[in-house]
Amino acid sequence: MLKGKKIILGVTASIAAYKSPMILRLLKKEGADVKVVMTPMAGDFVSPVTLSVLSGHPVMTDFYNGTNGTWNSHIDLGRWADLMVVAPLTACTIGKMVNGIADNLLVATYLSVRCPVILAPAMDVDMYSHPSTKRNNELLQSHGNVIIEPAEGELASGLTGKGRMQEPEIIIDRIKEVLADRKKQSAKKKMTD
């Protein structure tokens, strides 16, 4: 199902980023070509080197490489992808996506993609249940994004509640469902043309 699919894995600055390498491994195991885009602070939670080795591509964290001037084109990346998944997704990045604040490569890429987008929020229970976060999630869904609701359980803060990013296997299953639905829609469209 994922063989040959081109997927952008977005990673934001959340403790749940420790699950991102497993998501990447599972995508690669299924035959996907994965490029990773991280927010600048995400590297404080998971190593870009780890994600680069697992993906086989350099990890992109900024619009350009300050050492050699290489440009990371969010537009080219957005046109390259068959699907974008952001896991984990913080409240901060949700707010930026909703309002089109492209002050980092991940949000600029999100605004440039022409493919389905799957979002896997991860945050503390009070942040997730806050009216602003609820409204922003509803807006993201109204823009056609697929949101994988977080699980309930023990959180990094020591609190218990809804906010844990779903397990990598659940995220992979949802990716397969979204791509299968897209394939069906494309086939239907061809039949009616």
Image (spheres, grey):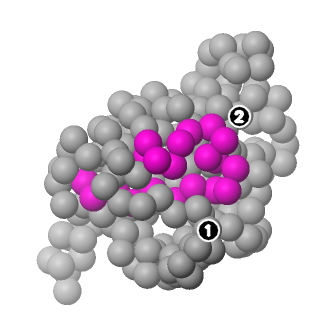
Q: Nearer the viewer, residue 36 or 102?
A: 36
The quadrant where residue 77 appears: bottom left
Q: Residue at x 74, y 62 (%)?
A: 96
Q: Secondary structure at mark 2?
A: loop
Seen in the picture, residue 173 relative to 152 is either above or below; the reply is below
Marker disc for residue 74: none
Q: Nearer the viewer, residue 99 or 87?
A: 87
Instruction: Please tell me how crowded label 1 is: few (under 14), some (14-19), or many (20+) other residues with Cα within 10 Å.
Output: some
Tell me where the magenta segment starts and ends, as one range.
32-51
**Count of marks placed on residues:** 2
In the visual, does 99 lie left or right of 6? Answer: right
170 drawn magenta: no
* Residue furthest bottom as drawn: 193
Q: CA distance from mark 2 to mark 1?
A: 24 Å
Q: Secondary structure at mark 1?
A: loop
The quadrant where residue 81 appears: bottom left
Closer to the N terminus: mark 2 or mark 1? 1
- Looking at the picture, how far across and down is residue 41, in whole percent? 70, 50
- Looking at the picture, how far across and down is residue 166, in whole percent? 51, 30
- Looking at the picture, how far across and down is residue 193, in whole percent? 20, 86
Say if residue 85 shows up in the picture: no
- Looking at the picture, how far across and down is residue 167, in whole percent? 45, 28
Amino acid carrying mark 1 in the image? Asp
Seen in the picture, residue 89 relative to 37 is either above or below; the reply is above
Amino acid carrying mark 2 in the image? Met
Task: Give the residue number, with chain letter if any, for mark 2.
Answer: 123
Q: Nearer the viewer, mark 2 or mark 1?
A: 1
Q: Residue at x 77, y 14 (%)?
A: 159
Task: Give the residue number, with chain letter if any, for mark 1.
Answer: 62
